[in-house]
Structures are given as C-alpha cells and as structure tokens.
Image (cartoon, rainbow, N blue to C red):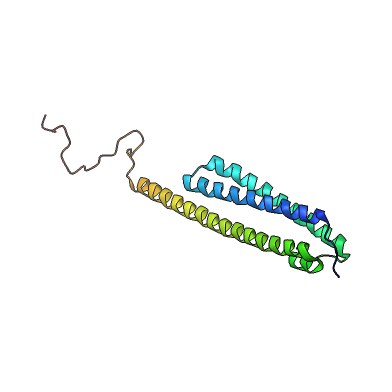
C-alpha cells in the first residue's frame, strides 16, 4: 500500500530534530555546569532539560496520531519511521529512511550524554560526601576546648605550662 506521506509528518520529524539538537546542547551545558560545580546553573538547566524532554514527548505523540490517522490503524507506543517508509514512494521513502537513521543517531547521542552526565553527578556527589566525611571526622576527633561548664580543658596537663609555676 504505497501512498503520499502528508507534509505534516515531515514537519513533525523536522521539529523533533530541532528539539533533539537543543536537548544535546542542554546536556553539554549540564556537563559543564557539573564539572564547574555551578549549582544555580545546574538547577536552571535541569528545568530546561525537563521542559525539552516534555516537548519531545508531545511531538512524538503528535507524530503517533498523524501516523494513526494516515494508516487507519492504532500505532503502538512509538512511531516506527521504518514502517512509515515502507508505505512511501520514491523520494519520500529515501527521505524517511535518511531521517530515521539521523534521528536514531541523535537519540543514541542523547542517551550516551545522559549516562555520562549521570556518572559525573554521581562521582561529584561521592567526592563531596567523602570530603564532608573527612572534614566532620577530623572535627569530631578533636577534644573540646572546655570541660566542666565554663572551665577550659587542660591539654597536656603532665607537661609544664608556658608560664612557669615557680614564679
């Protein structure tokens, strides 16, 4: 069953390319913010990333609905551009095949960057926890400066004090 693919589908695919490229840019900025320990920027990027992911989901849903309308059959959870390309003719088929490959590559790159950023964040958190543990353990090992309320502890009480007791 070969038929002309509506231009709206190509527009949605182009929109998804744009959103995925923007998401890659956000992920690169996120990585830089993690390395720089720029928490305020990291929080802002996290919000932008969530918004961008939601936009990608919306485009995916619109694409799914368009394919459903085109085929008359309910699509599964995700649109498979390879199935859509099988319905196309000539240049449309070649265009869909090319876009599918490019979109798969973009999504793989997004997934890889997400994993790398996740590892960066986890490593950073681990290092910060270790640093805090080192700082707090050295503080807890120190003797307090005061013993009984209001009286200073005498350190090294077996050794002579700075001012001789003979005076």
Q: Who is closer to the viewer here, 119 or 102?
A: 102
Residue 123 coordinates in the image, percent (x, y): 47, 55
Horizontally, residue 78 falls left or right of residue 101, namely: right
Seen as rendered, the residue at the extreme top is 167
* Rendering quarter of residue 91: bottom right
Horizontally, residue 119 falls left or right of residue 58, namely: left
Horizontally, residue 91 falls left or right of residue 34, namely: right
Residue 132 coordinates in the image, percent (x, y): 43, 48
Q: Who is closer to the viewer here, 142 or 57?
A: 57
Residue at figure coordinates x 75%, y 64% from the top left:
81
Quadrant that contains the N terminus: bottom right
Seen as rendered, the residue at the extreme left is 166
Quadrant that contains the C terminus: top left
* Rendering quarter of residue 76: bottom right
Horizontally, residue 10 falls left or right of residue 45, namely: right
Q: Who is closer to the viewer here, 43 or 94?
A: 94
């Amino acid at each position: 069953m070969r038929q002309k693919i509506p231009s709206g589908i190509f527009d949605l695919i182009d929109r998804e390319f744009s959103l995925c490229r923007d998401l890659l840019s956000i992920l690169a900025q996120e990585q830089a913010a993690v390395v720089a320990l720029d928490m305020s920027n990291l929080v802002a990027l996290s919000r932008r990333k969530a918004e961008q992911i939601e936009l990608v989901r919306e485009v995916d849903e619109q694409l799914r609905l368009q394919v459903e309308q085109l085929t008359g059959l309910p699509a599964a959870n995700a649109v498979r551009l390879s199935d859509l390309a099988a319905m196309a003719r000539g240049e449309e088929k070649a265009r869909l095949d090319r876009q599918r490959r490019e979109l798969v590559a973009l999504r793989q790159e997004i997934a890889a960057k997400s994993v790398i950023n996740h590892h960066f964040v986890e490593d950073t958190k681990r290092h910060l926890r270790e640093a805090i543990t080192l700082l707090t353990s050295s503080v807890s090992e120190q003797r307090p400066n005061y013993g009984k309320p209001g009286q200073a502890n005498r350190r090294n009480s077996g050794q002579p004090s700075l001012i001789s007791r003979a005076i």
